Amino acid sequence: MHSSNPFSVSRIAGVLACLGLMVLVPGCPQTSDPIQVQEGIVDPVDTVADLTVDDAADATTDGTPDSATDVVDADAAAETTIDKDHHLLVPASLCPKSARRTVDYVVDGDTVALQGGDGEHVRFLGVDAPEMNYTKPALGPECGAQLATDTLKKLLPKGTSVCLVFDPKSGDKDMYDRLLRWVVVDRPEGLWLVNAWMVRIGLAWVYYGFVEGTKFEDELVAAEDAAWSEGAGSWKACSW
């Protein structure tokens, strides 16, 4: 956690408040300010603007797992690496065909829906993104929510094959019956851990209280520290 981040204490307090209200509301808003994009910071949407499913065609399967519930235990994974562009790359052993599912659509910056007819959703483990407030249209999206959602839509368009990595420290599902998973996608650089990437580009933050002891806790915290220090994404634009 940031020793000099003035928002850290309030953010932790917000998490505690969320825990107390969880039975009533899906998430706690960070701000209702209009969305802004800071000039001089690399626009995360531009970094994935030309992505297509074909980019990873050679590495993906048809997206149909051997079993709808087959997942890989993150504890069994080998070491991760970070490339020159700060992508957290995971080993291929983490993503066998049995762990594959296909994206139907992006819900917001930390949730996607899966194809398969059962309406199953995946909540990105260990991270939180600003709320779109679909059920509270009068409020509108929180600051940074639309940018996070649009960026994730570019990276994970309909039909994208992803692998879902189970972490025994988190449990299988959250209280809203969404799968809790590390989400990995094939890219030319290797297998990206999407959870960490959204944090590193400043469009999501670490969900303290729900990441302790998990496989990629240290990597997420390091990604957040770097994003905060750079004012990346919405950190400065939204005054997180």
Image: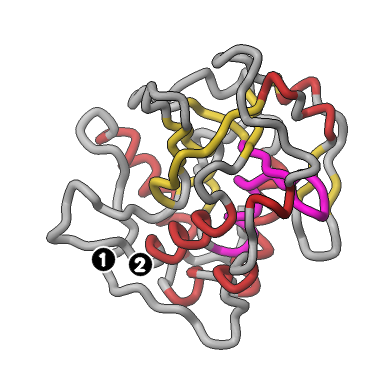
Residue lying at 63% horizontally and 20% vertically, measured from the top left: 65
Residue lying at 29% horizontally and 74% vertically, measured from the top left: 34
Residue 78 pos. (x, y %): 86, 30
Question: Toward the viewer: 58 or 235?
Answer: 58
In the shown orientation, is residue 45 left or right of residue 186? left
Whether 128 is drawn above or below 204: the answer is: above
Residue lying at 25% horizontally and 35% vertically, measured from the top left: 21
Looking at the image, which residue sits at the far left?
138
User: Could you say which disc has been placed on residue 32 in the image?
Assistant: 1
Quadrant of the image occupied by residue 214 = top right
Name the element at disc 2. loop
Residue 189 pos. (x, y %): 82, 54
In the shown orientation, is residue 239 left or right of residue 203? left
Question: Toward the viewer: 92 or 16?
Answer: 92
Question: Toward the viewer: 80 or 92?
Answer: 92
Instruction: Read off the magenta span.
Output: 183-202
Q: Which residue is mark 2?
A: 143
| 194 is within the stretch colored magenta | yes
Q: Which amino acid type is marked by label 2?
A: Cys
Quadrant of the image occupied by residue 16 = top left
In the shown orientation, is residue 103 left or right of residue 227? left
Q: Are marks 2 and 1 in contact (CB under 8 Å)?
A: yes
The C terminus lies in quadrant: bottom left
Q: Judge the density around disc 1: few (<14), some (14-19), many (≥20) Cα neighbours within 10 Å.
A: some
Name the element at disc 1. loop
Count of labels in the image: 2
